[in-house]
Amino acid sequence: MLIKSWKNSQLKDNDVTDEQVYHDRRSVLKKLGFTGAMTLLSQSAVAGSFDWFSKDETPAFKTTPLNFTKAKEQLNPLTDESVATSYNNFYEFGTSKSDPLENAQEFNVDPWKLEVGGLVESPLSLDYDDLLSKFSLEERIYRLRCVEAWSMVVPWIGFRLADLIKAAKPLSSAKYVSFQTLYSPEQMPGQRSRFVGGGVDYPYVEGLTIDEAMHDLSIMSVGMYGKTLPPQNGAPVRLVVPWKYGFKSIKSVVKIELTDKEPPTTWNILAPDEYGFYANVNPNVDHPRWSQGRERRILGTGLNAQQRIDTKMFNGYSEVASLYSSLDLRRFY
Ligand SMILES: Nc1nc2c(c(=O)[nH]1)N[C@H]1C(S)=C(S)[C@@H](COP(=O)(O)O)O[C@H]1N2
Ligand SMILES: [Mo]
């Protein structure tokens, strides 16, 4: 996901040693009341940086159980909850996979306001309780494929994006849907510093076509693993579009607007040659710097908990193919 040259130069300038990072983490975690044993050995893990966080350490942020309809379609095995909630991309809280868990525990999700507007007849304004009560919540077990070529299997809980859009009564002129993450530099260290935030111009923005947004697979998630979302996964409400690369699934959304023009999207602005508007998972169209043909499926922290598997077209969700029958997916990546 990173702009390679930028990151490399920043790292050199900053000259952070593994040991410094380790000690910083340790003190932050202590402040949050983490007590489990953390070793330099696990910190230096090559495959990913999630295994320094072990299961018996409880984050400070409180999640609560949700009422929801169980998933119709079971998908086994799931990624361990401890991994899906500690190996994250959420650049507002830092660019390392372990940063969001570490830096987002004090994040304020209540009160919250999600505004739905633009080309609609009835603009909506949902507060925190509305998000959990206005729409029927269901579980959806989805594969999540990051553009960086790793993937997980996550039991999300949420409501259909289509239900939200219908409630706002879309005008026929609406062709796209834009999304915006909270802008709160006081709470999000990545929004205070270009180094911490990976050079992104915040707020993070994303977009879908109206047909993509209305598709049954597109959900607004308010929970995972039976409970409300933890902040590192995009609390209190985030988009999940499972047939697209993970960066489309924008977190901590405060604004949704229906428009007649393709909206700007964060990673496309940052590196248009590498990240397109559509960003459909596609093993036949490589990223300019790596292959998208295969992926590392992360299920847990044990020795056999990572599998190298083939990446499937549309991440295996072939039912969306008809959305793109007139689109050259090589050109519109
Ligand atoms: N606001 C915001 N949303 C975001 C990101 C981000 O940095 N900021 N990262 C994206 C990327 S690259 C991925 S892979 C997914 C990761 O979601 P997860 O941490 O819940 O697995 O969130 C996406 N949503
Ligand atoms: Mo990603």
Image (cartoon, rainbow, N blue to C red):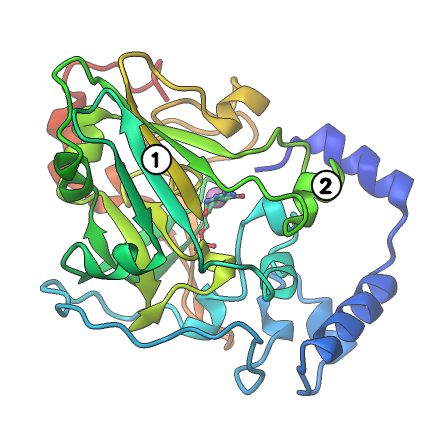
* Image position, residue 321 (x, y; %): 15, 30
User: Is label 2 within 8 A of ligand 1 (CB to nearest ligand atom)?
Assistant: no
Q: Quadrant of the C terminus?
A: top left
At 45% from the left edge and 60% from the top edge, which residue is drawn? 110
Q: What number is the disc on residue 160?
A: none
The numbered dot on residue 283 is: 1
> Would you identify the image quadrant in which residue 155 lies?
bottom left
Quick one: label 1 or label 2, which is nearer the N terminus? 2
Type of residue at label 1? Pro
The x, y position of residue 86, in whole percent, is: 54, 66
Residue 57 lies in what quarter of the image?
A: bottom right
- The residue carrying pointer 2 sits among few (fewer than 14), some (14 to 19) or many (20 or more) residues within 10 Å by Cα, namely some
For the question of whether residue 60 can be seen, the reply is yes
Secondary structure under badge 1?
loop
**Left or right: 169 with respect to 92?**
left
| Residue behind mark 2 | 192
